[in-house]
Structures are given as C-alpha cells and as structure tokens.
Image: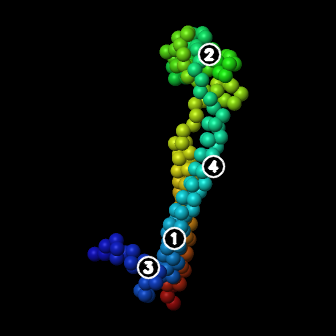
Amino acid sequence: MSTPRDRVLAMRPWNPNPLMRRSDRIESWIRIVVAAVCLATAPIAGSVGIAVYTTAVQQIRVANAAKIEVVATVVDDPEAFGRTRPAFATVRWRRAGVSGTAIAPVPSIANRGDRIRIWLDADERPTTPPIGPAKATTAAIRAAAVVLLGACGVAVVVTESARWCAIRYQSFRWDQRWRRFDRPVE
C-alpha cells in the first residue's frame, strides 16, 4: 500500500519511471514553479503591507493633528433618530477666548446643561474623534492578504488549467489509440 509520501515522490518530474507520462512531468514542474511563486509572494506581500501601513500612519497623523478636543455644554435636549444612531444636540464651547456653537453628536443620555467632550477640526467644526493606529494595522494586513491570496489564487488557477489541459490531451490521445486499435479485422 502506498503512502501519501510515496505518491508525492512518485510525481517528481525527475522520476526515472518510464511509465510516467510527459504530461505528468510537465504538470509536476508547473506545481513546483507555482509553489515557488507562492513562497516568493510572501515577502512581496509583506512589503506591500509595510508600505500601506506607513502611508496610513502618515495620513492618520495629519488628520489627527488638526483635531482639537474641547469641553462643550449641551444647549438643548438631544434628538435621537432611531435606536442605533447617535443623538444630536446643539452644543456651545469656548476655546482661546472665542465661543462656538454647532449641532454635534452627543450621548443619548445627555441632558440640557451637561458638559461633554467633542472634537473640532481645523475650521472649528465638530468632527469625529482621532483615528487610532489600529486602522493603519488593519489596512496593512488587508493589503498584504489581498496580494498574497491574489497571487496564490492565480497560481491555483494556472495549475488547475494546466491539469485540465493535460487531462484533455491524455483523453484525446487515448481516443486516437482506441480508434487505431478498434478497426475491423479483414
């Protein structure tokens, strides 16, 4: 009984077995090349991930640098538009001697007169809180995974296409041989 190891060794393209077809040898070489390409793609995917991470970190730093946290007072009662959405209310703040008023997201349990923290952009409009570094990490991992899985996916398609062509060719040759053999005897 043959083991999986024996079957793998039997499919080596340099196997001296005369019963191994030429198409089997070609298919074995294709599998070896595809495996090498998949292994070589890992450092490339890592480089892409590092580049995406570096770019994302720079963009996050620039975006976060313009954001300022201030303490604002809720001026009117919050209005909630559905259970899953945040409530909005008019808030007022004072920063560097200048007052500001805007409609901003507030906790749904906030009441008139409560003091809350909000973030302002460079134009002193309410904005989202600063973005954390986890977003850059996620973007980098996603980019590296797309490169790696894309390359390996293409490699699998190439391998299976070569296998399908080899099977079609073997079937064609087998039919030719049967036709030659299956002629009427005179």
- For image coordinates 65% across by 21% down, the residue present is 95
Front-most of residues 114 and 41: 114
Q: Please name the residue that numbered disc 4 is placed on.
A: 55
User: What numbered label is drawn on residue 12?
Assistant: 3
* CB-based contact (under 8 Å), mark 4 and mark 1: no
Amino acid type assigned to the residue bearing label 2 in the image: Val
Give the colour scheme shown.
Answer: rainbow
Q: Earlier in the sequence, mark 1 or mark 2?
A: 1
Quote the CA–CA distance across marks 3 and 1: 15 Å
Q: Nearer the viewer, residue 34 or 50?
A: 50
Structural crowding at the residue carrying mark 4, measured as other residues with C-alpha within 10 Å and reported as few (<14), some (14–19) or many (≥20): some
Residue 163 lies left or right of residue 124; in this view the side is left
Whichever of callouts 4 and 1 sits on the residue coming sooner in the sequence is 1
Under mark 3, the amino acid is Arg
Which residue type does callout 1 highlight?
Answer: Ala
Q: Is mark 1 on a helix, strand or loop?
A: helix
Mark 3, Cα crowd under 10 Å, few <14 / some 14-19 / many 20+, is some
Quarter occupied by residue 87: top right
Q: Which mark is residue 36?
A: 1
Mark 3 or mark 1: which comes first in sequence?
A: 3
Q: How far apart are marks 1 and 2 (CA)?
A: 60 Å
The answer to whether 28 appears left or right of 123 in the picture is: left
Which residue lies under the disc numbered 2?
91
Residue 50: percent from left, percent from top:
57, 55
Q: Do the residues labelled 2 and 3 touch (CB within 8 Å)?
A: no
Q: Image point 59% across, 18% down: which residue?
A: 72
